[in-house]
Image (cartoon, rainbow, N blue to C red):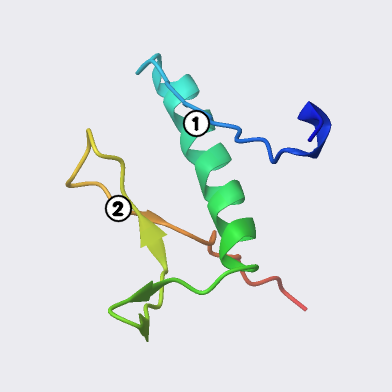
Amino acid sequence: MSKRSKPQTIEYAFRFAKGTDTEQARMVEMIRVNLAALIEQVVLTHDGQEVPVDGFRLRDQPDVIYALTQKKESGHE
């Protein structure tokens, strides 16, 4: 069997320094956008039951919850 026919395992490790408030806000936005896109493709479950997800928190900020979707301001139409 050639090396090309073997499945490849790709592992990723994401590490983010705390950084400035602006850098933190950008990181949170990057997580929000990517998580929202992932949620559109998969259904999260717990013990076989679907789990609705509407937000997330960072492990180093357990008291801060970020909304998964940004609230849209209503326009004056």
Q: Amino acid at mark 2?
A: Ile
Q: Are marks 2 and 1 in contact (CB under 8 Å)?
A: no
Q: CA distance from mark 2 to mark 1?
A: 14 Å
Circle number at residue 27: 1
- x then y, percent, for residue 66: 38, 52
Q: Residue furthest front?
A: 1
Q: 72 and 26: which one is in front?
A: 26
Mark 1, other Cα within 10 Å: few <14 / some 14–19 / many ≥20: some
* 62 with respect to 68 (left or right): left
Quarter placement of the C terminus: bottom right
- The numbered mark, 2 or 1, whose residue comes first in the sequence reads 1
Q: Quadrant of residue 16?
A: top left
Q: Residue at x 28, y 79 (%)?
A: 47
Residue 64 screen position, x and y as percent: 25, 47
Q: State the residue in front, 13 or 76.
A: 13
- Furthest toward the left, the residue is 63
Q: Residues within 10 Å of mark 2 (few under 14, many from 20)?
A: few
- Residue at 57%, 38% in the rendered image: 30
Q: Secondary structure at mark 2?
A: loop
Q: At numbered mark 1, what does the secondary structure look like: helix, strand or loop?
A: helix
Q: Position of residue 5 (x, y in %)?
A: 80, 39
Q: Quadrant of residue 2?
A: top right
Relative depth, front residue between 26 and 46: 46
Q: Which residue does the image show at 31% across and 41% down from the upper left? A: 58
Classify 1 as above or below 64.
Answer: above
Asked if residue 50 is positioned above or below residue 68 in the image, the reply reads below
Q: Is residue 17 above or below residue 30?
A: above
Where residue 1 sits in the image (x, y, percent)? 78, 35
Q: Which mark is residue 53?
A: none
> Where is mark 2, residue-wise?
65
Q: Amino acid at mark 1?
A: Met
